[in-house]
Amino acid sequence: MVTLKQLAKELNVSISTVSKALNNSTEIGGETVKRVKELAELYNYKPNKVALSLKQNKTKTIGVIIPNILNHFLAKVLFGIEREATKNGYNIITCISNESLDKEKEGLQLLANGSVDGFILSMAEETQVNNEIDHFKRTISQGLPIVMFDRVAHDVLCDKVIVDDFESTYNATKVLLAENRKKIAFISNINDLSVGKLRERGYNKAILETGTMEPLVLKIKKKDDHPKKIKSFFKKHKDLDGVIAADSSSGIIGLNMAVSFGLKVPKDISVIGFASKSDSYHTVPRLTTIRQHAKTIGAKAAEMLIHRIQNGTPSDKVVTKIVKTTLISNKSTL
Amino acid sequence: MVTLKQLAKELNVSISTVSKALNNSTEIGGETVKRVKELAELYNYKPNKVALSLKQNKTKTIGVIIPNILNHFLAKVLFGIEREATKNGYNIITCISNESLDKEKEGLQLLANGSVDGFILSMAEETQVNNEIDHFKRTISQGLPIVMFDRVAHDVLCDKVIVDDFESTYNATKVLLAENRKKIAFISNINDLSVGKLRERGYNKAILETGTMEPLVLKIKKKDDHPKKIKSFFKKHKDLDGVIAADSSSGIIGLNMAVSFGLKVPKDISVIGFASKSDSYHTVPRLTTIRQHAKTIGAKAAEMLIHRIQNGTPSDKVVTKIVKTTLISNKSTL
DNA sequence: GAATATATGGTGACACTAAAACAATTAGCT
DNA sequence: AGCTAATTGTTTTAGTGTCACCATATATTC
C-alpha cells in the first residue's frame, strides 16, 4: 500500500503536488502530472479509503441489518441492496440480527460510530414482538438516517419500503374463491411478524366477505416440525380444496404434502404461496406464487437511503414506498 | 457524534486528558476521570472507528466476496463468517460477484485500498472457467491475506477451507449400491464448478468399481429449464432406481418429480442430494442429504483469516482445512 | 531542597485534500 | 525598458479523530 508521502519523496515534490496531480488539478504542470501518474501507476497507488473517510466525514458505506440471511426473501433484498449500493459507489456492511433484539441493538451501536453513513434494516422478530423502537429513534437522532423495509415500525419516523401484504392475500384468496373453492385454509409460519398478521387479515377479509365461509387458519411456530404440522392439518381437513400460504416453506410443503396424499393439483386443490421463482420450481406442479420483488425492494431502499445521505433531507420528511406484489399463475391453480 | 475535542472543550481540559480518562489510564486523577466519563456517557461518546482505523492501520473489517447470495449454501457460509467475525470484534463488508470475473476483480480492487484487513472468498464461476487467478495473487502480494472456501484455486498460495467433495459422492453412491440399486444416475446443475467436477468423479469411481455398471450423468446448464430437463431424463430412463444430486435443487426437483411420476420413494427409487436441513423439508418424503456444514466452513474461514491477520503469519505458510460432510439419512433412502 | 509521585498538557503521526501562501515566470502597459 | 499585474506551478498550513509519547507543572515525601 503506497501512500502519497512515499510517492512525493521519490519524486522530490510535496505531498499535495502528488495529490493534485492525481486528481487532475489544472494547477499542476503537465510534465509533473505525467511523472506523478507514471509512478503512481507503477506502484498501483490507490487513495486510502480510511483517510478519505476521516477527512470527508463520510464513509460511502451503508450498514445493513438483516434478521436472517437464510430467508430467501431477505437474502434477495440484500442482493438488491448490494447491487444498487455498488452502482452508486457504496459498500455494505452486513450485520445479522438472527431475529434477536439484543443483536440488532448491538449491530446498530457498533456501526453508529462513524463506520457507516446510514442504515437499511428489517426488524428482528423479537423487536417486533416486544415493540421496542427506542434504539432506532436514538440512531436517527444521532444523525444517521435509517430506511426500513418489509418488517417496519410505523412509529419510527423514517423512510420505508413495504409490500402490499394485506391486498396480496386478499386478492389471492379472491382468485381461489373465483375458482369456486369451498374450503380455503391459510397456513403461516410467520404469524408473529407484522407482515404475517397483515397477510392473515387480507385472507380473513376475503373469506368473511363471502358471508358463508369461515376462516381456517393454521399457525406454525418456529420450533414446530413444519411438515408434520401440515400433514396432520391435511388429515384433519380432508375436504380442503384451497391453500393460501403466508411464507414460501408453507406453500412448498403444503403443495408437496397434498400431492403425497394423492390429491391432484390443481384439480382437487389449489395452492398459492408467497415464494420466489426458484422456490416455485421446488414443487411438481409448479407453485402459483405471490412475488414480492425482493430485489426491487432492496434497490429502492438503497436508492432512498443514498438519496437522503447525499441530499441531507430533513429527518422529519419521510416517504413510504409500497412495492406491489404480483401474482404469477403457474400450475397449482386452475 | 461527539468527539474528544468537544468533550475536552466542555470540560475545560485537554483532548489527551479526555482520551486517557476514557481509556482508564492511571495517569489521570479520579475526580477528572469521573467527570469525563459522566459527560461521555451523557453524550453517548463512541471513539470514531475511522480515526482509529487510520491510526492503527487496521480496520477490524473483513471483505467477503461471494458469487451468489441466493445460493443457500453460500448464504449459510456467510452466516457462519458473520457470526465468527462478530464474535471477534470484526465487521464484514460483502461484495456479490454474481459469478462474474469482472465483478470479483472489482470488489477485490475496491476494498484493497485500506477498507479491509483481509478477504474471505469463494471463486466466481467465470473465474473458475477461465482459470484466472492473477488478481488473487496481486492482492496477497499487496499484503492482504485471503482465505478461500469451497470453490478454491489450488494454484493460489493461501489458506483454504474445503469440503470432501470427492469422498462424499463416492460414499453416497456406495450407500445406494449397498441398497442393491441397479441404475443410479448423477444429476448436476453445477458442472462448471470445481466442486461439481469432484462430486461427479466420486460418483464415477464408485460406479466403475462395480465392474458392471456404467455412469449415467445428467448435466443441467444454468439457462436450462431445470424441472423440464429432469422430467425428460426420467421419461427416458424409466428403470432409474437411484439418484445422486450434486446440488440441492437437483435433489429436490428430482425427488418431487419421481413422486409425481407415481414412483414410491424409497421403495422404487432412492435419492440422495447435497442439501441443508431446511431444504430437506421441501420434499415428501424428506430427502436424505449430504450436509456440508456451511456454518462451520464459514466460521473456520473467519477464524483462519483473523488468526492470520492478528499473528502476521508468513504468507507462504498456508493451511488447507477439510470440513467433512455428513450423510443424514432421511426418508428418501432405505 | 531535592527526589518522587500525581496530574495534566502538548506534539506528532496516521493519509489525505482544500485553501491559502508563495515563488517564478509571463504578459500588458506606459 | 521597466514596472505592475496576471498566470502558473509548487509548497505550506490546517484540519479530520484518535492515542502514544514526551513534557511540564504541582503537590508530597523525606
Image (cartoon, coloured by chain):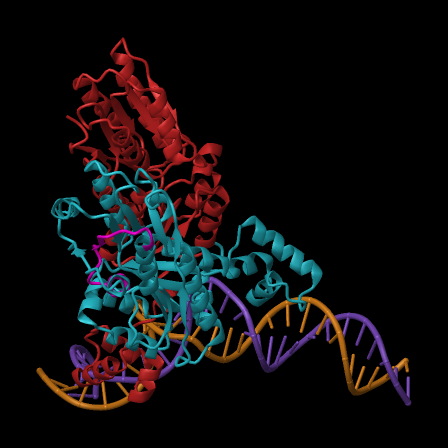
Chain colours: A cyan, B red, C purple, D orange
Would you identify the image quadrant in which residue A331 lies?
top left
- Split into 4 quadrants, where in the image is the C terminus of chain B? top left
Would you identify the image quadrant in which residue C1 lies?
bottom left
Q: Vertical placement of B322 versus B147: above or below?
A: above
Q: Vertical placement of A331 versus A205: above or below?
A: above
Residue at left offset 23%, top offset 45%? A254
- In this view, the residue in front, B230 or A84, is B230
Residue C16 % position (x, y): 51, 65
Q: Vertical placement of A162 versus A140: above or below?
A: above
Residue B10 % position (x, y): 31, 88
Membership of A327 in magenta stretch:
no
Residue A65 % position (x, y): 31, 62
Give the extent of the magenta segment.
A178-204
Membership of A185 in magenta stretch:
yes
Residue at left offset 25%, top offset 50%? A242
Camera sees residue B174: yes
Camera sees residue B153: no
Residue at left offset 22%, top offset 41%? A258
